[in-house]
Image (tube, helix red, strand yellow):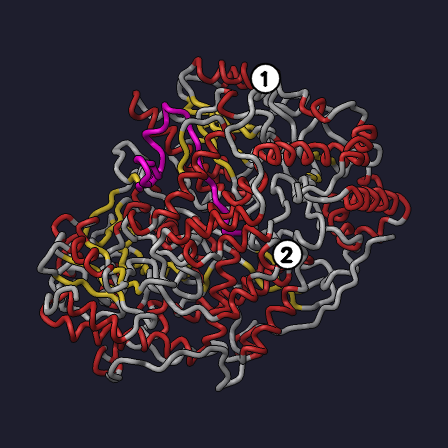
């Protein structure tokens, strides 16, 4: 059965355009204290005027507004969402239910430790399980996203060097790394030095050895890297970096490939971050909230961001004291709601289940690789784990690009993979299927991409004009950037 | 394993297609020496019932606001949440999708972000707002970094009335930059010492940070603080940790602010033990290319129909890498959606009514507390109370009445160990407010 987009989508204006005076979608209890006029409590200059243009809609209109808009989104529950290095896996419903248990979700962050023992236990348990899974010695759940976890890790590296001698100047970053890596290094006061990939798609060990000096604070590597390739020479890399007194930071974005098979802690990694919204199934929410716990070896423990949770007998305590810490990254304890979901996931999957997840994620990616390698250019023949990167070089002959292939996939009923990343691969199509989807879904995806490859050869206009079946055709991104319209304004002011 | 859809037979067939005998062979690139050999110390899989029971039992150990009357605020507020919010955000179309990289398949998310950006602009009276950041504290840190980029000056003035945890987060973000953070003390109103501010301002200052209502609940003179800072060419960054106050108080944009950042948790997000929260970030149009984070913008498709895309991405890490305005990749998408739904549900009238209820209930407590109040300045829904006994002790006593009291300030300010920061919202009922006042003023002991 050919998979196509056929959905029932209604047009829907902006909430402001739908608004009319006097409507509302709320109810409040009557005021139960004496009704002092606002003017007697505050001075007139404190008070604002009515908010011009603010929405006024009924509850029914509000629900239909968002329901209609929701049908314009592709999502994980609809089908495979193969964004590489994003790990768009199934988000279990039980996680959602557990996070909404009132005793857990309706607790104030500044209650005394004795008044939130349940939530402290949740934090503590996840810390412990993440230590097990990564083979690291200590964990802080503070960072509110992957990039903040990276920043935390690099700040810890810096604190380590400062305490020993001097901060050093450079952070080495492979050319296949996420853009957040160099951006985080800069925020920590470092300069980013790129390391090229070798002919197999791994870190060029020779180049690393040449660039690794006593001015280098750390190497930031992603393992497996963004091409899905394991850094097989990790022990040699580690020796090179550590011999010069440097540290190794690992971006744990691709940890979904490793659970139960290998642990960063056993690879001489000094510090890493994990993405709970990738490996541990917390929902991506249209861009967030995520969560980026940072884990480290003992030598870096004193610098972990605050607070962490420790157990004293039967009691859990927030530890806000360590003087060496890089400090706070969040007003409270990071994205606790994501911690609850991740713990729920670990308990539900169990030891063997977690290993099976990684196993099937790698199996699925390799199955897709085999299914497509006769049709798309594979820039590296090196074996891959949980994801695979192809290019558009074969399709280019008829003028079809990665962007076109991606857009045409929409007409075939799939969300496109990550495109034009990693940057060291020209025209990259980066596919990560995850463990979640059935063989039928994988086969349909493979067939869709093969069909597009044939279309590219025989009928390229069909591909370059895609998508034809989505709610909108291709959007003019140049216009959006040249003439930014970043908010709605009432008619007379709208551009 | 119910989260996997591949049967053992299918696994076998897939391995045949791939051309290996067993699945372990796919991991051959991992050297033996770093392979995991012993099983992890993680329990066997638990059933749905067991998992639910475990988490419910943990929930019972917390003094949560469904069972206790709480007077805690200090950056996290217990407000009414309309039922319809959970219905909207429980749609998998919203919560299981990702950053809208493919706009043709993400118009729902993009339009929601565009509406959120507009609502934040309306609320703050600013010209542009981004698609959100992690929380109020990191939003402030990003604003400070932006002020440093814009002015190229080395000093930031920070009041002692700023939330202490926000202050710490700013300190973490700035730790390795050559920047000086200078404190501005508070006066007896609880507001910023303006004389001290005047003396501290010079052309080294990149920005003046002002929180209003401030950590002690006091409404600051944003207009005057902004005027003074702009006179010396430094920027004015207004922080709002209680976003509901914007439903009633004069918006910082009308008072001249260059940036308005804050915490949106009050607008429909459950307390959630402090996270996920929602950092909002608004500024003037002329500064938009220096903003951190995602931005949704309006455009048209190839047939001229209105649509939305992520835009001005040349500021961002995935394009600019080490030259980006920030390392942030997240927008707090689902929390921004919550906020947009909340503001749309309450609307023009409801937001005002809710804010007024907070003001009036808190004012009622103020009157009951009378001379026990530490500061004379006007407040919205929080206030500092001087206690005769140790506030930590008072907190314990309040538990007998089913009340989780305010925040003992000694935790952050050793010289205020006799004080408690109390918050009153629409959720606190009259009899509990009166009981709290009795115990705080020592009129009556625990009954």
Q: Residue A106 in the image: state x and y as whole percent.
A: 40, 59
Q: Nearer the viewer, residue B150 or A149?
A: A149
The boundaries of the magenta stretch are A288-317
**In the image, is residue A291 part of the stretch drawn in magenta?**
yes
Residue located 51% across and 21% down the image? A266
The quadrant where residue B46 appears: top right
Position above or below: B392 against B248: above
**In the image, is residue A38 part of the stretch drawn in magenta?**
no
Whether residue B145 is visible:
no
Side of A381 where A169 appears, left or right: left
What is the distance, in whole Å, between disc 2 and disc 1 at their CAs? 41 Å
Foreground label between 2 and 1: 1
Q: Residue B93 in the image: state x and y as whole percent.
A: 63, 59
Q: Chain of mark 2?
A: A
Q: Chain of mark 1?
A: A
Nearer the N terminus, badge 2 or badge 1?
1
Q: Residue A484 in the image: state x and y as whole percent.
A: 55, 62
Residue indicated by mark 2: A477
Element marked by disc 2: helix
Q: Given the current orientation, which residue lies at the most extreme bottom position?
A: A22
Q: Quadrant of the N terminus of chain B?
A: top right
Q: Which mark is residue A434?
A: none
Element marked by disc 1: loop
Residue indicated by mark 1: A233
10 Å neighbourhood of mark 1: few (<14), some, or many (≥20)? some
Position above or below: B313 against B94: above
Whether residue B233 is visible:
yes
Residue located 33% across and 72% down the image? B426
The quadrant where residue B362 appears: bottom left
């Amino acid at each position: 059965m050919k998979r196509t987009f056929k959905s029932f989508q209604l047009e829907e204006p902006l909430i402001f355009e739908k608004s009319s005076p006097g409507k509302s979608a709320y109810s409040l209890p009557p005021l139960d204290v004496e009704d002092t006029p606002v003017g007697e409590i505050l001075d007139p200059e404190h008070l604002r005027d009515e908010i011009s243009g603010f929405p006024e809609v009924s509850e029914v209109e509000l629900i239909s507004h968002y329901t209609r808009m929701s049908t314009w989104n592709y999502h994980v529950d609809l089908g495979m969402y193969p964004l590489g290095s994003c790990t768009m896996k199934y988000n279990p419903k039980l996680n959602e239910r557990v996070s909404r248990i009132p005793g857990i979700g309706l607790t104030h962050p500044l209650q005394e430790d004795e008044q939130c023992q349940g939530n402290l236990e949740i934090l503590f348990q996840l810390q412990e399980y993440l230590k097990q899974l990564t083979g690291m010695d200590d964990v802080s759940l503070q960072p509110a996203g992957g990039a903040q976890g990276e920043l935390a890790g690099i700040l810890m590296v810096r604190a380590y060097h400062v305490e020993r001698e001097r901060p050093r100047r450079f952070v080495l970053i492979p050319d296949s790394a996420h853009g957040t890596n160099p951006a985080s290094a800069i925020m920590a006061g470092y300069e980013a030095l790129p390391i090229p990939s070798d002919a197999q798609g791994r870190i060029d060990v020779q180049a690393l050895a040449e660039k690794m000096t006593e001015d280098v604070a750390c190497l930031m590597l992603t393992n497996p890297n963004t091409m899905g390739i394991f850094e097989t020479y990790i022990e040699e890399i580690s020796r090179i970096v550590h011999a010069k007194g440097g540290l190794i930071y690992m971006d744990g974005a691709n940890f979904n490939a490793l659970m139960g098979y290998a642990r960063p802690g056993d690879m001489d990694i000094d510090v890493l971050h994990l993405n709970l919204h990738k490996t541990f199934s917390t929902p991506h929410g249209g861009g967030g909230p995520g969560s980026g716990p940072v884990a480290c070896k003992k030598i870096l423990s004193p610098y972990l961001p605050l607070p962490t949770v420790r157990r004293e007998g039967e009691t859990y305590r927030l530890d806000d004291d360590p003087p060496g810490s890089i400090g706070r990254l969040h007003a409270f304890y990071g994205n606790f709601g994501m911690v609850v979901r991740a713990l729920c996931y670990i308990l539900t999957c169990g030891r063997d289940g977690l290993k099976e997840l990684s196993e099937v994620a790698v199996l699925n990616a390799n199955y897709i690789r085999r299914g497509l390698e006769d049709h798309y250019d594979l820039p590296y023949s090196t074996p891959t784990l949980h994801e695979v990167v192809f290019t558009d070089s074969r399709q280019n002959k008829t003028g079809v690009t990665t962007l076109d292939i991606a857009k045409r996939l929409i007409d075939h009923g799939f969300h496109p993979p990550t495109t034009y990343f990693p940057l060291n691969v020209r025209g990259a199509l980066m596919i990560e299927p995850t463990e979640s989807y059935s063989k039928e879904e994988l086969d349909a995806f493979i067939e869709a991409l093969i069909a597009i490859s044939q279309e590219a050869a025989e009928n390229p206009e069909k591909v370059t004009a895609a998508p034809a079946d989505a709610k909108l055709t291709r959007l003019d991104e140049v216009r959006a950037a040249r003439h930014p319209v970043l908010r709605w304004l009432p008619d007379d002011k709208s551009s | 394993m119910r989260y996997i859809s591949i049967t053992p037979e299918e696994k076998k067939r897939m391995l045949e297609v791939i051309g290996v005998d067993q699945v372990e062979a796919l991991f051959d690139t991992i050297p033996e020496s770093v392979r995991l050999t012993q099983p992890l110390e993680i329990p066997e899989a638990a059933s749905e019932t067991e998992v639910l029971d475990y988490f419910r039992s943990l929930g019972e150990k917390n003094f949560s606001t469904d069972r206790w009357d709480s007077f805690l605020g200090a950056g996290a507020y217990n407000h009414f949440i309309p039922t319809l919010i959970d219905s909207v955000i429980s749609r998998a179309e919203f919560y299981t999708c990702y950053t809208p990289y493919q706009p043709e398949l993400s118009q729902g998310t993009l339009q929601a972000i565009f509406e959120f950006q507009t609502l934040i602009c309306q609320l703050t009276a600013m010209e542009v707002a981004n698609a959100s950041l992690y929380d109020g504290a990191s939003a402030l840190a990003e604003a400070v970094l932006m002020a440093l980029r814009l002015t190229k000056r080395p000093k930031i003035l920070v009041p002692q009335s700023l939330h202490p945890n926000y202050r710490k987060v700013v300190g973490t973000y700035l730790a390795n930059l050559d920047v000086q953070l200078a404190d501005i003390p508070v006066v007896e109103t609880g507001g910023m010492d303006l004389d001290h501010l005047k003396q501290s301002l010079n052309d080294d200052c990149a920005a003046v940070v002002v929180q209003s209502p401030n950590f002690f609940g006091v409404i600051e003179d944003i207009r005057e603080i902004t005027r003074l800072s702009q006179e010396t060419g430094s920027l004015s960054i207004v922080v709002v940790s209680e976003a509901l106050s914007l439903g009633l108080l004069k918006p910082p944009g009308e008072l001249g602010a260059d940036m308005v950042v804050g915490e949106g948790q009050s607008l429909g997000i459950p307390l959630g033990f402090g996270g996920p929260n929602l950092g909002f970030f608004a500024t003037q149009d002329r500064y938009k290319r220096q903003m951190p984070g995602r931005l949704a913008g309006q455009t048209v498709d190839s047939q001229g129909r209105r649509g939305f895309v992520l835009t001005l991405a040349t500021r961002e890490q995935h394009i600019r890498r080490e030259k980006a305005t920030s390392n942030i990749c997240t927008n707090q998408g689902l929390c921004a959606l919550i906020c947009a739904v909340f503001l749309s549900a309450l609307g023009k009238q409801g937001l005002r009514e809710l804010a007024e209820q907070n003001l009036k209930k808190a004012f009622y407590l103020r009157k009951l507390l009378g001379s026990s109040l530490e500061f004379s300045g006007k407040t919205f829904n929080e206030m500092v109370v001087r206690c005769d006994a140790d506030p930590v002790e008072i907190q314990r006593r309040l538990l007998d009445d089913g009340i989780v009291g305010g925040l003992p300030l000694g935790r952050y300010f050793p010289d205020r160990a006799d004080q408690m920061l109390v918050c009153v919202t629409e959720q606190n009922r009259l009899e509990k407010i009166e009981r709290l006042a009795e115990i705080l003023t020592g009129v009556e002991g625990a009954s």
